[in-house]
Image (cartoon, grey):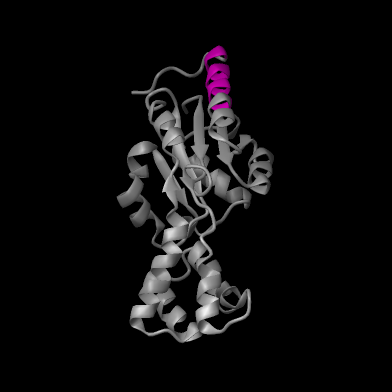
Amino acid sequence: MSASCVVLDIGGVLEITPETGWVRRWEERLGLPHGGVGERMRDVWVAGGVGAVGEQEVRREVASRLGLDGPRVEAFMADLWTEYLGTPNDELIDHVRGLRGKCRLGILSNSFVGARERETELYHFDELVDRIVYSHEIGIEKPDPRAFEAACAALDVRPENCLFIDDVAVNVEAARAAGMQAHLFEDNARTITRIAAHLDAGLLAGGSAPLG
């Protein structure tokens, strides 16, 4: 096992994903109360997050539960993905790209069915890190400890040698409980400083030789 590793979340970390208000706009169009879309679609969203449904089934459920025809289903899903994918956090992505060969790099993301294809096309995360672990592909979401175990196993690293970065406090706490080091993402500057400290500690421990 290689000594040092950095694992990052996607949404809110590698992607900048502010709320766009798309759900409320659809509720207004459909005459639904605030929270109405979530109430009708909640179990589908949960199932999509752990890969229990496919994209076509999601579309069928959107059509059925919200009373949308084909073109409006596509418009609804386009709005969903626009917020989900956000925009790239270029500064952090560039920094992580510069770490290749210095440590193991991974992604652990609570995702939605279809995310890998879209994020690969837009952001090429598959070229940025060694392994991507998506919740919809492993059937487990953070903060379940098994999600962190899956990431460490995929990267062939020990938890204690791995720094996990997430913008959700409960996930950071869960990573620590799973034996990992962890950092709550608040901004790029502090995150980049924390990554450097982690890698420096690995070098001092004598176990972070460059990876080929």
Q: Is residue 54 visible in this depiction of the protein?
A: no
Q: Answer with the quarter of the image where residue 74 lies.
A: bottom left
Pinpoint residue 210: horizontal percent, then vertical percent.
40, 19
Return the residue nearer the eye: 17 or 124.
17
- Residue at horizontal 50 percent and vertical 49 percent from the top: 11
Looking at the picture, how far across and down is residue 192, in whole percent?
A: 53, 27
Q: Is residue 83 left or right of residue 124?
A: right
Residue at coordinates 52% horizontally, 13% vertically from top-left? 206
Question: Along the horizontal axis of the image, is 7 left or right of 114?
Answer: right
Q: Is residue 132 magenta?
A: no
As drawn, 121 above or below 5: below
Is 42 drawn above or below residue 165 in the view shown?
A: below
Residue 175 % position (x, y) = 63, 41
Q: Is residue 168 visible?
A: yes
Vertical arrangement, residue 35 with respect to residue 131, above or below? below
Indicate the position of residue 203 as horizontal and vertical percent values.
52, 15
What's the residue at 39%, 61% (across, down)?
A: 114
Asked whether, in this view, residue 46 is left or right of residue 98, the answer is right
The quadrant holding residue 102 is top left
Q: Nearer the viewer, residue 75 or 166?
A: 75
The quarter in which the C terminus is drawn is top left
The answer to whether residue 195 is magenta is yes
Above or below, 189 relative to 155: above
Exactly how many numbered labels are in the figure?
Answer: 0
User: In the displayed image of the protein, which residue is found farthest to the left?
Assistant: 121
Magenta range is 194-204
| Magenta span main SS | helix
